Amino acid sequence: MDYRYTASGLDNVTLVGLKNVCDDDGEECITIPNINGLHKAIANAIVTHPRGMSGKELRFLRTLMGKTQAELGAEVHREGLEVGRWERGDHPIDPNAEAIIRVMTKEHLGLDLNARMDEITGWCVQTAETQPILIDASDPEAYKPLAA
């Protein structure tokens, strides 16, 4: 079954192949085990998708890394207020800062990002549409992004 996962704060995440379970009354319900693994797979999908990230995706990555807006801003040589504007969608994310954030996320979370810096900077172009994030949820111990 496909399930739109909005608890992450993102509107564009769909879990594909999620298994239904039954509660004690026999009603079908959704359970999502291994949330940390799921959030890492979502982060991997964000840092590797070839379109500019949205403000909500930036907020997701920042909070997953445990950073404040001010801390992230300092690391990309911007004010924390500017990071807040990016996250709210008031201003487009600076492409150079976005490339650095992608690499920082990869290093912080131990993600697989086998791309050269020129490829990564090419992905950091804002678009009007949000990239769908599809996550293979058939094996909760090994969540992985699917090609959209």
Image (cartoon, rainbow, N blue to C red):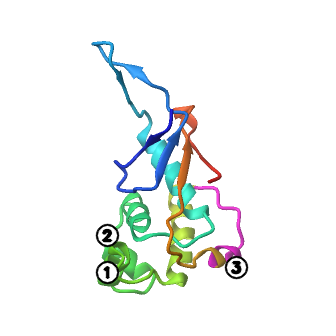
Disc 2 secondary structure class: loop
Mark 3 — residue? Answer: 118
Q: Farthest residue toward the top?
A: 25
Residue type (three-letter) at the residue carrying disc 3: Asp
Instruction: Say whether residue 35 is left or right of residue 108.
Output: left
* Label 3 crowd bin: few (<14), some (14–19), many (20+), radius 10 Å: few
* Label 2 crowd bin: few (<14), some (14–19), many (20+), radius 10 Å: some
Q: Is residue 89 above or below residue 40?
A: below
| Pair 2/3: label in front | 3
Tell me the quarter of the image containing the C terminus. Answer: bottom right
Mark 2 — residue? Answer: 68
Segment tinted magenta in the rendering: 111-121
How far across and down, in percent of the image, does residue 22 sit? 37, 18
Is residue 112 a member of the stretch shown in magenta? yes
Residue type (three-letter) at the residue carrying disc 1: Gly
Instruction: Say whether residue 140 is left or right of residue 67.
Output: right
Label 2 to label 3, Cα distance in Å?
28 Å
Q: For the point 49% across and 46% down, which residue is it?
A: 14
Residue type (three-letter) at the residue carrying disc 2: Thr
Q: Which comes sooner in the sequence, label 2 or label 3?
A: 2
How far across and down, in percent of the image, does residue 104 sit? 52, 69
Q: Is residue 113 above or below residue 119?
A: above
Mark 1 — residue? Answer: 80
Image quarter for residue 125? Answer: bottom right
How far across and down, in percent of the image, does residue 7 sit? 34, 48
Q: For the point 37% across and 51% down, which residue is it?
A: 8
